[in-house]
Amino acid sequence: MLALTRKKGESLVINNNIEITVLEVRGDQIKIGISAPKDVPIYRKEVYMQIHEENKAAVSMEGLETLKNLL
């Protein structure tokens, strides 16, 4: 993991097309802004993990059997 220090108003750029800016620092929370192309999905990690788990469940053996029964 790369750890960087940024102050309010400072940014970092990822892959030439994603910019992350520190908008606000309040106590132990920060507010960030993300500028990225519309085709780049951006999720909070807990939401991403939930989507990932649901996708795994959808392609499980039980899910495949259900799909076979539909066809």
Image (tube, rainbow, N blue to C red):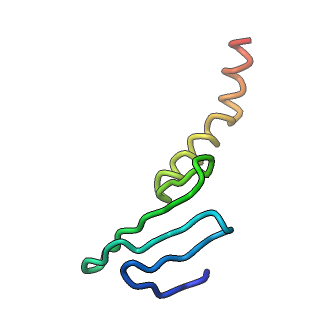
Q: As displayed, is residue 30 above or below residue 56?
A: below
User: What percent of the width, then of the height, locates residue 48?
Assistant: 53, 52
Quarter-wise, where is residue 18 in the image? Answer: bottom right
User: What percent of the width, then of the height, locates residue 63?
Assistant: 66, 29
Q: As displayed, is residue 4 above or below residue 38?
A: below
User: What percent of the width, then of the height, locates residue 26?
Assistant: 25, 77
Q: Nearer the viewer, residue 67 or 39?
A: 39
Q: Nearer the viewer, residue 9 or 28?
A: 9
Quarter-wise, where is residue 58 in the image? Answer: top right
Quarter-wise, where is residue 16 in the image? Answer: bottom right
| Picture residue at 74% right of the left edge, 11% below the top | 71
Decide if residue 2 is on the left or right side of residue 30: right
Q: Nearer the viewer, residue 17 or 64?
A: 17
| Picture residue at 60% right of the left edge, 83% below the top | 2
- Residue placed furthest toward the bottom: 5
How many marks on residues? 0
| Picture residue at 71% right of the left edge, 33% below the top | 61
Decide if residue 45 is on the left or right side of residue 39: left
User: What percent of the width, then of the height, locates residue 8?
Assistant: 36, 80
Locate the N terminus and report the quarter of the image it occupies: bottom right
Q: As displayed, is residue 66 above or below residue 41?
A: above
Q: As displayed, is residue 15 above or below residue 12?
A: above
